Image (cartoon, grey):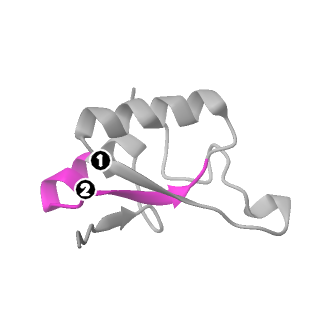
Amino acid sequence: MDLKIFKTLWGHVGSFEAACADAVNVGFDGIEGPSHSSRAVRNAYQRTLNDHGLGYIAEITTGREKTRFKEGQHSGALSA
């Protein structure tokens, strides 16, 4: 059995790029966070994850629309 440890974006302050760099620096295997509503941003996130050799767990929530992740609700702009 492989145990993989993922860094959550919950409470992260900074860009997605910074979250990935932080995860690599402390030995995480990937990132866990909400799925972005924009396909372009999701594709950019995938490239960033690939560049850092990280996996991803998409946090999926149900309920009211305002709980869905949108630009600005997260930790800042994506550095791609």
- Is 22 located above or below residue 50 in the figure? below
Where is residue 18 drawn, in percent x and y? 31, 45
Q: Nearer the viewer, residue 33 or 13?
A: 33
User: Which mark is in front, 1 or 2?
Assistant: 1
Where is residue 15 drawn, in percent x and y? 41, 44
Q: Nearer the viewer, residue 77 or 38?
A: 38
Badge 2 element: helix
Q: Which residue: 24% across, 39% down?
A: 52
The quarter of the displayed image where residue 36 is located: top right
Q: Which residue: 23% across, 73% down?
A: 1
Q: Amino acid at mark 2?
A: Ala
Q: Which residue is mark 2?
A: 23
State yes or no: residue 15 in magenta.
no
Q: Nearer the viewer, residue 64 or 47?
A: 47
The quarter of the displayed image where residue 37 is located: top right
What residue range appears in magenta?
21-35
- Is 17 located above or below residue 75 in the figure? above
Q: Which residue: 55% across, 36% down?
A: 42
Q: Amino acid at mark 1?
A: Leu
The answer to whether the residues at label 1 and label 2 have Cβ atoms under 8 Å apart is yes
Residue 43 shows which numbered tag?
none
Where is residue 49 drawn, in percent x and y? 35, 40
| Image position of 66 (left or right of 5) | right
Where is residue 14 drawn, in percent x and y? 39, 50
Q: Specify whether residue 78 is in view.
A: no
Residue 54 shows which numbered tag?
1
